[in-house]
Amino acid sequence: MRRTVSAYADHTRQEKLADVPCHLIGDGVHDMPDDILMGLARSWMRSTGQLQGDQAETAFLVVEEGG
C-alpha cells in the first residue's frame, strides 16, 4: 500500500498545499510511525520549496493511504 503525506492550510483539509509520496523521502519509511514520517515530510517539503515561510511551520499534515 502506498502512503503519501499531504499538507493542508488547516485542519479542514479544504486547501491542499503540497504532497509527497513517501517513497521519495527514503527507504523504509513505509513502516515508520506517522508522527516521525510527517516530520520527515515537513523537512522534505521545506527543502524542495513545496512549503515556504510560515506554511512550512503551520501546515496541517496528514498521512494518507491508498493504491
Image (spheres, grey):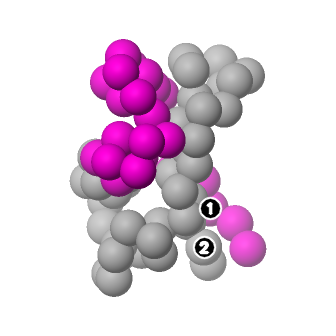
Whether residue 61 appears in this view of the structure is no
Mark 1 vs mark 2: which is more N-terminal?
2
Tag of residue 35: none
Tag of residue 65: 1
| Residue nearer the viewer, 31 or 55 | 55
Whether residue 30 appears in this view of the structure is yes
Q: Tag 2: residue type?
A: Arg
The x, y position of residue 14, in whole percent, is: 73, 22
Query: Dot 2, crowdedness within 10 Å: few (<14), some or many (≥20)?
Result: few
In the picture, the quarter occupied by the N terminus is bottom right
Q: Which residue is depicted at the point 49% across and 41% down?
A: 50
Furthest-front residue in this view: 49
Tell me: 39 left or right of 6: left
Query: Dot 1, crowdedness within 10 Å: few (<14), some or many (≥20)?
Result: few
- Reply above or below: 54 against 6: above
- Reply above or below: 67 against 38: below
State yes or no: residue 62 in magenta.
yes
Q: Tell me the SS state at disc 1.
A: strand
The x, y position of residue 6, in whole percent, is: 56, 44
Tags 1 and 2 touching, CB below 8 Å: yes
Give the residue number, with chain letter if any, for mark 2.
2
Q: Tag 1: residue type?
A: Glu
The x, y position of residue 41, in whole percent, is: 37, 51
Q: Which residues are magenta?
A: 43-67
The x, y position of residue 52, in whole percent, is: 41, 28
Which image quarter: residue 27?
Answer: bottom left
Q: Which residue is depicted at the point 51% across and 51% down?
A: 5
State yes or no: residue 29 in magenta.
no
